[in-house]
Each structure stands twice: as C-alpha cells, then as structure tokens.
Image (tube, helix red, strand yellow):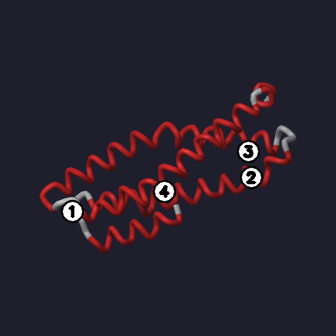
C-alpha cells in the first residue's frame, strides 16, 4: 500500500487517461464507424466485419486493461489508503466500467458475432442503440 500511496497521482492520471481514451474511442466508433456498416457492400461485408472486430479488439486491449487495473488501485487508495475524496468518483467509475463490461460481453460481442454472417439492419440498429449506453 505504501508504494501505491507514493504513486497515487501517477496512478490516477493513468486511470483518467485510459478512461478518456476509451470514452473518445467509443464515441468515434458510435458516430463514425458503426454507421458506415450500412454502406459496406454485401460482397465485402463479412470480411469488413471480421477486420473491424480484430482491429478494434487490438486497439481496445491495452487501454481497457490499463483502465481496469488502475481502477483497482484507485479503489484501494480511496477505501484503504485514506484518499476519501476519491471514493465517490472511484465507485461511479467502477459502476460505469461494470455496466460497459456487461453490455460488451452480453450484447455487443454476441451481436458482432451475429453480424459476422452478414449485415442485418435490425441487429445493426440494436447495436447502435445499446452502444449509446456504453
């Protein structure tokens, strides 16, 4: 805990940076990339969807992992390290991350798997709707 206390500012900065990156990336996906799914031709859609999932997954991995690991540290600082001012933001961020993980795991990823077989307007609309929560 002592090392965590000494590096608390660095930990919080890394966490905030990872969180802001993820917020920006999700908005970019939602307003730029997802709407373009409807314009990909039928003959290339399956390969486009596969490339999207692969590339986005690689782009998300490090920031999402960083956000999750640093959230654990921030929660530890807030509740075990005496940084009481971090408690409410840390809990809100933890709850938001949990919602995002549930939506991603139980809705977005399965929907992308279904879209891997070809574009479906109804599935695409559902993906767009649920992504607004994310």
**Residue at the spot x=83%, y=38% of the render?**
81
SS for callout 1: loop
**Residue at the spot x=61%, y=38% of the render?**
69
Is 102 in front, or is 47?
A: 47
SS for callout 3: helix
Q: Earlier in the sequence, mark 1 or mark 4?
A: 4
**Residue 43, image x and y in percent?**
12, 58
Q: List the residue tagged with mark 2.
A: 89
Say whether residue 114 is left or right of residue 89.
left
**Mark-to-mark CA distance, 4 and 3:** 26 Å
Q: Earlier in the sequence, mark 3 or mark 2?
A: 3
**Mark-to-mark CA distance, 1 and 2:** 41 Å
Say which mark, if any, is on residue 75. 3
Say whether residue 15 is left or right of residue 49.
right
Q: Earlier in the sequence, mark 4 or mark 3?
A: 4
Using the image, determine if residue 28 lies above or below residue 80. Answer: below
């Amino acid at each position: 805990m002592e090392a965590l206390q000494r590096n608390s500012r660095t930990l919080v900065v890394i966490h905030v940076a990872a969180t802001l990156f993820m917020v920006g990336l999700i908005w970019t996906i939602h307003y730029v990339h997802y709407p373009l799914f409807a314009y990909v031709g039928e003959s290339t859609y399956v390969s486009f969807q596969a490339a999207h999932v692969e590339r986005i997954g690689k782009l998300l991995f490090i920031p999402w992992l960083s956000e999750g690991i640093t959230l654990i540290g921030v929660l530890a600082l807030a509740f075990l390290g005496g940084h009481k001012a971090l408690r409410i933001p840390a809990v809100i961020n933890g709850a938001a991350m949990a919602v995002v993980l549930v939506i991603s795991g139980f809705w977005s990823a399965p929907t992308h798997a279904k879209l891997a077989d070809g574009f479906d307007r109804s599935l695409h609309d559902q993906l767009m709707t649920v992504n607004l929560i994310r």
